[in-house]
Image (tube, rainbow, N blue to C red):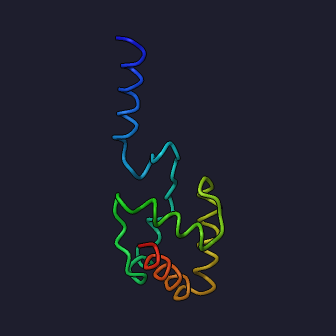
């Protein structure tokens, strides 16, 4: 086996990894999603494997955090929800509608 072939196999394995983990060599962390089921319902968003990264980016834009910092994002999400849950869900709903 040559290195070129092994590299292609590795790239194939990375590309076949669950889309919630790898995308364009970036790591997406959505550890806080399990706590937001009700918010997603209020926002009218059905989170799937295919759209999880996009939803994550929208949330990070709303709370103004970086994508590689899951604990910081969750901290800010909790703060926004505590202050105005309906408002946060509305912002998420609007951002979701504008994306397409």
| Quarter of the picture holding the C terminus | bottom left
Classify residue 30 as left or right of residue 81: left
Q: Where is residue 91 in the image (x, y as percent from the top left)?
A: 53, 82
The image quarter containing residue 16 is top left
Q: Nearer the viewer, residue 74 or 9?
A: 9
Q: How many labels does the image show?
A: 0
Given the current orientation, which residue lies at the most extreme top position? 1
Q: Where is residue 36 in the image (x, y as percent from the top left)?
A: 46, 72
* Image height of 81 relative to 13, above or below: below
Q: Position of residue 99 (x, y in %)?
A: 45, 72
Classify residue 52 as left or right of residue 78: left
| Quarter of the picture holding the N terminus | top left
Residue plotted at (63% across, 85% down): 83
Residue plotted at (57% across, 80% down): 81
Q: Which of 68 and 26 is in front in this view?
A: 26
Residue plotted at (36% across, 47% down): 18
Q: Which of 42 and 22 is in front in this view?
A: 22
Q: Where is residue 10 in the image (x, y as percent from the top left)?
A: 40, 28
* Image height of 88 relative to 15, above or below: below
């Amino acid at each position: 086996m040559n290195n070129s072939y092994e590299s292609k196999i590795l790239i194939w394995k990375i590309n076949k990894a669950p889309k919630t983990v790898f995308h364009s060599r970036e790591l997406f962390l959505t550890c806080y999603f399990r706590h937001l089921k009700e918010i997603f319902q209020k926002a009218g968003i059905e989170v799937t494997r295919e759209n999880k990264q996009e939803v994550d980016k929208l949330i990070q834009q709303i709370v103004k955090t970086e994508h590689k910092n899951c604990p910081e994002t969750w901290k800010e999400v909790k703060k926004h929800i505590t202050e105005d849950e309906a408002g946060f869900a509305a912002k998420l709903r609007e951002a979701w509608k504008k994306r397409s």
